[in-house]
């Protein structure tokens, strides 16, 4: 498995080694906070499958190119660990579940979402 970890990244890593200001999205109460805070500040949720090499690769690329000067709240959702939260995200924001997936939330609504390679094509600065 060592060669696959080098190519796609270890599937056991979460956000603990990242330089990004991730906030873990681990329960429905925090999801409600995300919705409420979106009225004053852009909220971004990155839905990640820790067992998927493609999801790990997209996450690494996202972290590498993320503009650290953005004034947004950035949430990380481990889909496997918190499946019920992921289901609630889909229901609350009326967005079909995909993985990996990035949701940009403003004013209590998803204003843009992307999945897979499209995530890293987004220019987050235009939404702030």
Image (cartoon, grey):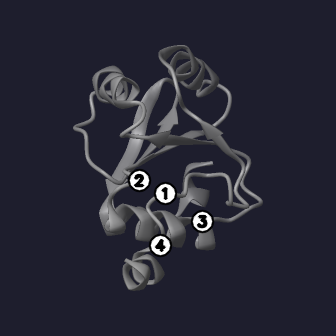
**Front-lying residue, 30 or 73:** 30
Callout 1 touching callout 2 (CB < 8 Å): yes
Task: Point out residue 110 in the picture as x, y percentages from the top left corner.
Answer: 41, 35
Instruction: Say above or below: 56 vs 48.
Output: below
As drawn, the label of residue 9 is 4
Q: What's the distance in space between the residues labelled 1 and 2, CA to CA?
A: 6 Å
Query: Which comes sooner in the sequence, label 3 or label 2?
Result: 2
Query: Which comes sooner in the sequence, label 1 or label 2?
Result: 1
Residue 121, by quadrant, is bottom left
Callout 3 touching callout 2 (CB < 8 Å): no
Q: In screen coordinates, is 88 left or right of 37?
A: left
Residue under label 2, please give it. 50
**Front-lying residue, 2 or 6:** 2
Q: Residues within 10 Å of mark 2 (few under 14, many from 20)?
A: many
Camera-nearest label, 1 or 3: 1
As drawn, the label of residue 12 is 1
Q: What's the distance in space between the residues labelled 2 and 4, CA to CA?
A: 10 Å
Q: Residues within 10 Å of mark 4 (few under 14, many from 20)?
A: some
Residue under label 3, please give it. 63
Query: Which comes sooner in the sequence, label 1 or label 3?
Result: 1
Q: Residue furthest front?
A: 1
- How many labels sit on residues? 4
Q: Give the residue drawn at x 48%, y 40%.
A: 77
Element carrying mark 4? loop
Task: Point out residue 33 in the picture as x, y percentages from the top left corner.
Answer: 60, 19
Query: Which comes sooner in the sequence, label 3 or label 4?
Result: 4
Callout 2 touching callout 4 (CB < 8 Å): no
């Amino acid at each position: 498995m060592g060669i696959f970890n080098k190519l796609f990244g270890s599937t056991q890593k979460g956000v603990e080694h990242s330089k990004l200001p991730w906030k873990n999205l681990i329960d429905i109460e925090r999801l409600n906070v995300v919705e409420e805070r979106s009225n004053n500040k852009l909220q971004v949720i990155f839905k990640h499958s820790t067992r998927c090499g493609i999801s790990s690769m997209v996450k690494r690329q996202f972290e590498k190119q993320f503009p650290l000067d953005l004034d947004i709240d950035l949430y990380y959702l481990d889909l496997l660990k918190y499946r019920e939260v992921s289901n609630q995200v889909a229901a609350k924001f009326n967005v079909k579940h995909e993985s990996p997936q990035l949701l940009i939330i403003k004013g209590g609504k998803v204003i843009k979402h992307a999945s897979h390679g499209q995530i890293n094509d987004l220019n987050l600065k235009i939404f702030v």
